[in-house]
Image (cartoon, rainbow, N blue to C red):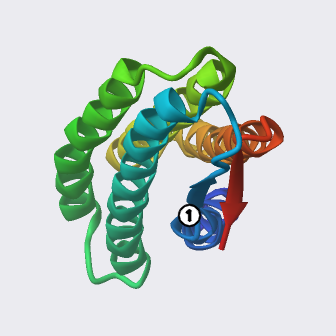
Amino acid sequence: MNSVFTLPLLIILVFGSVAFSYSSQLSLAQNTTSPSSQPAALFVNSFEKLVKEAHNLTQNYQNEVGKWKTHQHDNKTMISITNNYLPKYENLVNQSKTLQPPKEFQYATDLYTKSLGSELQSYVHFRNYLSTNNSTENKLSSKFLSDAFNQEIDSFKALKSSGLFTVVP
């Protein structure tokens, strides 16, 4: 394995195991003292369901990447696996876009949608890297995955800072 590939792959593997284990612990606890808690309750249930679905999908995909890393999958197999996962990520992005958050959660929701889109783009570039061995594709994959992580964290921070929800382990 060449050194151009090693660092971005390391970023992908660390991101997949650390970043998304953080989101697996996400639970949004609604503060019931807010007058806008009724509309927020509908949103938070939908949002939490989406976050859990995204986490499970990412965890499953990262397990496949781990198999590729340990040579249990070759590039052709990993390309096929990635091609099967991409529509699932597109679906998550679309689901996120259809959420109807209360105004005070729009920014957080937009950030989360961007996070899902960045993750999707990361895997598109990763697939392209597997197909072409172009190190630029690999670097782009890592960049988008890093962006996805940062956007997700910022989304959760924005929800927490609203004062209506608490992020709990």
Does the image show residue 6?
Answer: no
**As drawn, which residue projects farthest toward the top?**
103
The amino acid on which the numbered mark 1 sits, given as a three-letter code, is Phe
Q: Quadrant of the N terminus?
A: bottom right
Give the residue at mark 1.
Answer: 20
- Residue at 35% x, 45% y is 127
Left or right: where 161 falls relative to 56: right
The quarter of the picture where residue 92 lies is: top left
Categorize mark 1 by other alpha carbons within 10 Å: few (<14), some (14-19), many (20+): many
Q: Position of residue 80 (x, y in %)?
A: 17, 53
- 165 vs 155: above or below: below
Report the label total. 1
Q: Position of residue 55 (x, y in %)?
A: 43, 59
Give whichever of 29, 19 is nearer the camera.
Answer: 29
- Residue at 65% x, 74% y is 169
Left or right: where 54 falls relative to 9: left
- Residue at 40% x, 29% y is 96
Q: Position of residue 111 (x, y in %)?
A: 63, 28
Q: Position of residue 168 (x, y in %)?
A: 68, 67
**Helix, strand or loop at disc 1?**
helix
Does the image show residue 47?
Answer: yes
Give whichever of 89, 105 is nearer the camera.
Answer: 105
The quarter of the picture where residue 140 lies is: top right
